[in-house]
Amino acid sequence: MAKKATKAKASRKKGKSLTWKGIKLTLPDALPPTVVFDFTEIDYSSGSGNPFPVMRLVRSILGATQFDKLRTAVEKGDIGADDVYDLVTAIMPKYGLTLGESSASASS
């Protein structure tokens, strides 16, 4: 388990950079495989107003240290908790993804 944690930290150090609302973040070169579960949970809770799946997604991508940096910015009032949704929208293009509804029809 320690090898995986070290590998994840190393990936974040050399990853993609993003400055969002004045906060410098380092994104991993590739999305962690666990984000599939986060996206599924976001989809499942869609419309419920539950922010926790989105927060878990952000933490999965950024890691605990950078997530704490965001939390501190919210505590200071530098950003609002709802702004984290905008952060996800800023992160996804770094991986060639966009957020939105599926183009699949309801009958498929």
Image: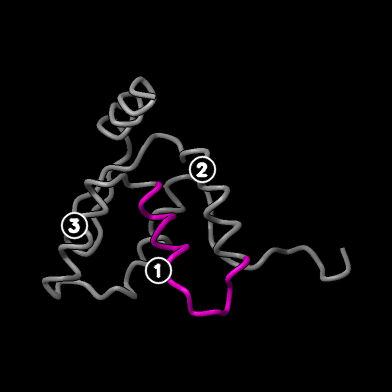
Q: Residue at x 39, y 24 (%)?
A: 1
Residue 37 among magenta residues:
no
Image quadrant where residue 102 sits: bottom right
Check disc 1: other Cα within 10 Å, few if <14, some if 14-19, many if 20+: few
Q: Does 97 appear above or below 16?
A: below
**What secondary structure is marked by label 3?**
strand
Q: Does 89 appear above or below 61?
A: below
Task: Give x and y (percent) for residue 73.
Answer: 16, 65
Kindly report which numbered mark, 1 or 2, lies closer to the viewer in this rendering.
2
Image quadrant where residue 7 sits: top left
Toward the front, the furthest residue is: 1
Circle 2: residue type: Thr
Kindly report which numbered mark, 3 or 2, lies closer to the viewer in this rendering.
2
Q: Residue at x 32, y 72 (%)?
A: 83
Tell me where the magenta segment starts and ends, as one range: 44-60
**What secondary structure is marked by label 1?**
helix
Say which residue label 3 marks: 23
Foreground of the two, 54 or 89: 54
Q: Residue at x 32, y 47 (%)?
A: 62
